[in-house]
């Protein structure tokens, strides 16, 4: 049995239309409930900061809006080889944000932290402009992405059981109650002051 947990990162800006699909998926996963050992993080645009708090040995799933050359609402499932992130097309597909996933993973490598098990679930955006809410195409893809991720994590080897000193409350219950960690809560838990 694996001792690894699974970390799921939602990336994006909810104020920029379909760019908010990552955080929206994290919210939906929290409401539906995830298996024990699966941890949900709303990273917003602070990908590097959140990656720095995670164990690189654990599988990492990233949910983001990506330009992959498809139609709005298409879902891309991309398995990243983090040691070959300069491969043709890798940077382009994941460069929707000014601070994207690929450069953040590369910075982690430079510091000796290699995330070797990375899967990106990307939604092809329809509209990334100021305004709340997803386009109909992205909203239609959201449930499909959540279903795929739940199937993916349920097929992972079970993560470790919590130690006796860990809280008894289940993570899905906490997430459903609105306690999905974001950068501010992660920094507070680590004893760091918020930005």
Image (tube, grey):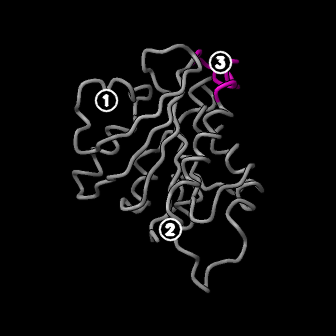
Label 1: how many residues lie within 10 Å, few (<14), some (14-19) or many (20+)? some
In front here: 105 or 184? 105
Residue occupied by mark 1: 90
**Highlighted range, magenta:** 126-141
Q: Give how far apart the Cα atoms at labels 1 and 2 are.
A: 32 Å
Q: Give how far apart the Cα atoms at labels 2 and 3 are.
A: 38 Å
Q: Up-down: is 176 above or below 43?
A: below
**Left or right of 142 in this view: 77:** left
Label 3: how many residues lie within 10 Å, few (<14), some (14-19) or many (20+)? some
Residue occupied by mark 3: 137
Q: Residue 31 lies in magenta, yes or no? A: no
Label 2 sits on a secondary structure element that is loop
- Among the two numbered marks 2 and 3 on one chain, the one whose residue lies closer to the N terminus: 3
- Which residue is situated farthest in the right direction here? 177
Q: Up-down: is 24 above or below 67?
A: below
Location of residue 3 in the rendering, given as x and y in whole percent from the top left corner = 45, 71
Closer to the eye: label 1 or 2:
1
- Among the two numbered marks 1 and 2 on one chain, the one whose residue lies closer to the N terminus: 1
In front here: 6 or 43? 6
Q: Residue at x 57, y 58 (%)?
A: 39
Q: Residue at x 44, y 21 (%)?
A: 67
Location of residue 110 in the rendering, given as x and y in whole percent from the top left corner = 21, 51
């Amino acid at each position: 049995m694996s001792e690894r947990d699974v970390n799921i990162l939602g990336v994006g800006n909810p104020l920029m239309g379909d760019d908010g699909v990552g955080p929206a998926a994290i919210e939906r996963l929290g409401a539906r409930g995830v298996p024990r050992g699966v941890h949900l993080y709303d990273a917003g645009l602070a990908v590097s900061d959140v990656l720095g708090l995670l164990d690189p040995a654990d599988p990492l799933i990233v949910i983001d809006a990506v330009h992959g050359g498809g139609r709005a609402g298409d879902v891309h499932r991309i398995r990243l080889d983090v040691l070959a992130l300069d491969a043709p097309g890798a940077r382009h597909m994941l460069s929707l944000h000014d601070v994207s996933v690929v450069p953040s993973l590369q910075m982690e490598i430079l510091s000796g932290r290699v995330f070797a098990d990375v899967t990106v679930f990307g939604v092809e955006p329809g509209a990334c402009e100021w305004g709340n809410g997803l386009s109909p195409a992205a909203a239609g893809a959201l449930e499909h992405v959540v279903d795929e991720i739940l199937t993916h994590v349920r097929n992972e080897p079970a993560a470790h059981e919590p130690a006796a000193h860990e809280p008894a409350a289940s993570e899905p219950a906490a997430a459903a109650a609105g306690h999905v960690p974001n950068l501010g809560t992660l920094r507070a838990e680590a004893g760091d002051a918020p930005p």
